[in-house]
């Protein structure tokens, strides 16, 4: 495996692991090795890569849904394109129903677990027609909390996902003062 | 023998979040294999701006990591000294980028941000004003890197 090894990132059960894999190995072999499938393990779906479907959604669409499909884990790392995609998400949800509140308005979209917080934020800023010049000043915060997830995190990594749903407020970023 | 804070830091350089950003070219700890603890020299990629470099170096003092946040500022590795103010990244007036990267505070030795040890110690009110950015022992260098890398890819970052 040495010399031809591919580094991939497996996100499962709220943890992210760096895994060294050979291109010919199947994803099933890797998930089995990590104890994520097999006897006693829950039946989860597996997605690869990062999903940005929502960013091309037409402005008028309400309650849209990502089309990103789970993969066949019997395929090899090479065939699944993990040399480029890198990320593997092993998650119970086909979609995560995201609600974003901004002022008195609310928008909905069903995101792939492989979407990042940054993708959700970019989608939300566009949906709420936030002035592009000020867009970077608005960030996502979990509803009813002061917690703002890191923008590079995938929805699959967030323990706040309950019953395949997640609620955010789009809030102005606080500028340090004093 | 390495201290626990250094060992923890080195363990965290194996986190998926760090490795992923490294492979994407977002950041790297330059002296990862040869740390002169507690000094850590790293670079962060910046979005293109006229006349500005595509990355900035930072020197951090990571004493007490993860229990204490790092402190430091932009660094000139060629001169082994703090980067002079004229070569530091700037933000639009009154933007968050301009506040965090301000050069007239603490003689430019610390970032004006809750993730900076010196800034946090000097601003106890930030615990209430920016509770989402309070450093605790669950934070890692990946949180720091992602936060500061986000500033250098912000629309409010205007170059040097």
Image: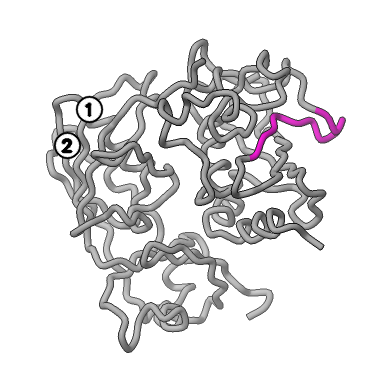
- Residue at coordinates 27% horizontally, 78% vertically from top-left? A42
- Residue at coordinates 78% horizontally, 60% vertically from top-left? B2
- Looking at the rendered image, the quarter that the N terminus of chain A falls into is bottom right
| Residue B23 forms part of the magenta stretch | no
Subunit that carries the residue with mark 2: A
Side (left or right) of A43 relative to A49: left
Residue bearing mark 2: A107
Q: CA distance from mark 2 to mark 1?
A: 8 Å
Q: Is residue B44 above or below residue B124?
A: below
For mark 2, give the secondary structure: strand
For mark 1, give the secondary structure: loop
Side (left or right) of A60 relative to A79: left
Q: Is residue B148 above or below residue A90?
A: above
Subunit that carries the residue with mark 1: A
Determine the residue located farthest toward the right in the rendered image: B79
- Residue at coordinates 13% horizontally, 44% vertically from top-left? A63
Q: Is residue A21 above or below residue B78?
A: below
Residue B22 x %, y %: 61, 51
Residue bearing mark 1: A128
| Residue B80 forms part of the magenta stretch | yes
């Amino acid at each position: 495996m040495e010399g031809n090894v591919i580094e991939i990132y497996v996100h499962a059960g709220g943890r992210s692991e760096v895994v060294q894999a050979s291109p010919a190995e199947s994803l099933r072999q890797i998930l089995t090795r990590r104890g994520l499938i097999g006897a006693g393990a829950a039946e989860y779906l597996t997605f690869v890569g990062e999903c940005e479907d929502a960013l091309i959604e037409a402005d008028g669409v309400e309650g849209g849904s990502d089309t990103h499909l789970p993969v066949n884990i019997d395929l090899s790392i090479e065939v699944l394109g993990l040399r480029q995609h890198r990320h593997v998400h092993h998650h119970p949800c086909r979609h995560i129903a995201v609600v974003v509140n901004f002022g008195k308005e609310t928008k909905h979209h069903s995101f792939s677990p492989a979407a990042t917080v940054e993708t959700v934020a970019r989608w939300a800023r566009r949906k709420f027609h936030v002035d592009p010049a000020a867009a970077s000043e608005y960030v996502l915060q979990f509803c009813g909390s002061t917690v703002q997830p890191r923008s590079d995190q995938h929805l699959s990594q967030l323990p706040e996902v309950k019953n395949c749903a997640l609620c955010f407020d789009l809030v102005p970023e606080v500028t340090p003062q004093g | 023998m390495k201290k626990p804070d250094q060992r923890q830091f080195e363990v965290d350089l194996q986190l998926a979040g760090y490795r992923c950003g490294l492979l994407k070219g977002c950041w790297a700890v330059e002296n990862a294999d040869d740390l002169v603890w507690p000094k850590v020299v790293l670079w962060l990629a910046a979005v293109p701006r006229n006349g500005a470099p595509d990355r900035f170096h930072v020197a951090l003092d990571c004493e007490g990591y993860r229990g204490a946040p790092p402190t430091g500022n932009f660094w000139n590795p060629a001169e082994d000294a703090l980067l002079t103010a004229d070569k530091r990244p700037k933000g639009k007036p009154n933007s968050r980028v301009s506040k965090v990267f301000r050069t007239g505070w603490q003689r430019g030795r610390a970032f004006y941000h809750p993730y900076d040890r010196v800034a946090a110690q000097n601003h106890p009110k930030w615990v209430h004003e920016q509770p989402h950015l309070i450093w605790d022992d669950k934070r890692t260098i990946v949180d720091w890197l992602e936060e500061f890398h986000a500033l250098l890819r912000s629309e409010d970052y205007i170059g040097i």
